[in-house]
């Protein structure tokens, strides 16, 4: 059959197991587990090994657009439908640091009401699907070998308190500077402390995932004017000075006291595995000739975004895992493959130590007010 569009078709041969991948992956997960235990001793509470600090937990809707073309009407997006979602905004580090520190920010999306068998066997019957996004288009340590170097360096300093935080901050700024030097930095996603308004950022899957019959990266960008105008905007200095530890929580709460917001989810489909590789997450796929194409809209209404009950539910009860998905959206590449084991190991430890049962919601009503 003649390929009628420019998009690379998915096949299992797209992924290539790396030399010593199993051993390197285990070393990464073991290092993360040791840091997890150190963080537990520090806080006397188990936290995530990444994106440990929440800033806002939102309920909303994901509306899949009607009449999508065949190459976009894939997997979850095959049928026009509206889903309830829970969204957690966070900071990337695996420790609880002041908001003023430079860091990547995260947007984890849990879609509720997704029918069909899921990829993880223990969650095969769940009615949820996760998308994990970060406000940067690539994974700077794009292969497991590079990630191992960073992880073990961080582990050596993990029990040194403020020094560990300083190293993590310098690493984040160093990543930004390196990518900016070669033209890969997005002006709306600068990491210079304390960063732009968290609600105005564009968030990316960073690595590739299966997109039904194709391969794609996913992003979520501001759509309504009130969040588009926040892109790149610096946060008010008086607000930062008033509470340098929690001003990101405050700006989200203040916005949604009366505000609504719309974001658009898009898919960037792979057209060339050489310039758009799957196994190296540090390569930004060129979007000048191959932009993200809209597939769905996220809508949020006024709400309390950081009540005590909602924070505990998101931080201690829920888990977000890129591999908790329909098989048609399976994450791809060696960085993502190691994340499968890392996320499950961290989640089990966190729920065990906090004596919390992991829950996959069946209704948005399970999210506390």
Image (spheres, rainbow, N blue to C red):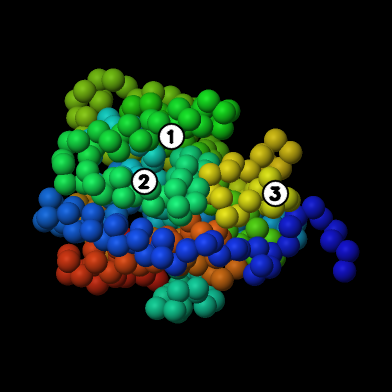
Q: Position of residue 54 (x, y in %)?
A: 29, 47
Q: From where the camera sits, is residue 278 visible?
A: yes
Would residue 253 be found to the left or right of residue 197 on screen? left
Using the numbered discs, state the Cα–Cα distance from disc 3 to disc 1 in whole angstroms: 23 Å
> What is the crowding at mark 2: few (fewer than 14 residues within 10 Å), some, or many (at least 20)?
some
Q: Earlier in the sequence, mark 1 or mark 2?
A: 2
Asked whether 304 or 181 is in front, the reply is 181
Quadrant in the picture for residue 67: bottom right
Q: Secondary structure at mark 2?
A: helix
Q: Residue at x 52, y 78 (%)?
A: 117
Q: How many marks?
A: 3
Up the image or down, 178 lies above or below 284; here it is: above
Q: Residue furthest right?
A: 2
> What is the crowding at mark 3: few (fewer than 14 residues within 10 Å), some, or many (at least 20)?
few
Q: Secondary structure at mark 1?
A: helix
Q: Position of residue 68 (x, y in %)?
A: 71, 56
Front disc: 1 or 2: 2
> Dividing the image into 4 quarters, which one contains the C terminus?
bottom left
Residue that badge 1 annotates: 175
Would residue 368 be found to the left or right of residue 225 on screen? left
Which dot marks residue 150? 2
Q: Earlier in the sequence, mark 3 or mark 1?
A: 1
Would residue 188 be found to the left or right of residue 320 on screen? right
Q: Earlier in the sequence, mark 3 or mark 2?
A: 2
> Dividing the image into 4 quarters, which one contains the N terminus?
bottom right
Q: Secondary structure at mark 3?
A: loop
Residue that badge 3 annotates: 274
């Amino acid at each position: 059959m003649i390929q009628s569009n420019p998009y690379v078709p998915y096949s299992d041969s797209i992924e290539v197991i790396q030399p010593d991948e199993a051993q390197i992956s285990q070393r990464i997960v073991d290092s993360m587990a040791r840091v997890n235990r150190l963080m537990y001793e520090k806080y006397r509470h188990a936290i995530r090994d990444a994106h440990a600090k929440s800033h806002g937990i939102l309920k909303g809707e994901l509306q899949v657009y009607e009449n999508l073309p065949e190459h976009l009407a894939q997997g979850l997006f095959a049928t026009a439908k509206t889903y309830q979602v829970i969204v957690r905004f966070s900071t990337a580090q695996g420790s609880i640091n002041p908001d003023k520190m430079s860091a990547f920010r995260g947007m984890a999306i849990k879609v509720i009401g997704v029918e069909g068998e899921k990829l993880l066997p223990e969650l095969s019957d769940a009615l949820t699907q996760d998308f994990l996004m970060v406000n940067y288009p690539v994974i700077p340590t794009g292969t497991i070998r590079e990630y191992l170097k960073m992880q073990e360096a961080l582990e050596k300093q993990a029990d040194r308190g403020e020094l560990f935080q300083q190293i993590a901050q310098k690493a984040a700024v160093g990543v930004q500077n390196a990518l900016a030097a070669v033209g890969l930095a997005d002006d709306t996603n600068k990491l210079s402390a304390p960063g732009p308004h968290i609600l105005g950022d564009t968030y990316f899957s960073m690595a590739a995932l299966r997109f039904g019959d194709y391969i794609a990266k996913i992003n979520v960008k501001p759509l309504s004017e009130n969040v588009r105008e926040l892109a790149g905007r610096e946060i008010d200095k008086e607000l930062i000075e008033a509470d340098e530890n929690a001003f990101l929580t405050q700006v989200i709460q203040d916005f949604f006291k009366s505000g609504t917001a719309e974001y658009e989810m898009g898919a960037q489909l792979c057209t060339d595995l050489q310039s758009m590789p799957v196994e190296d997450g540090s390569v930004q796929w060129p979007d000048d000739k191959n932009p993200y194409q809209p597939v769905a809209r996220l809508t949020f209404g006024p709400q309390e975004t950081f009540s005590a009950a909602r924070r505990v539910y998101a931080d201690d009860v829920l888990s977000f895992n890129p591999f908790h998905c329909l098989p048609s959206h399976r994450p791809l590449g060696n960085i993502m493959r190691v994340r499968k084991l890392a996320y499950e190991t961290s989640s089990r430890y966190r729920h065990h130590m906090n004596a919390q049962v992991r829950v996959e919601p069946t209704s948005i009503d399970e999210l506390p007010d």
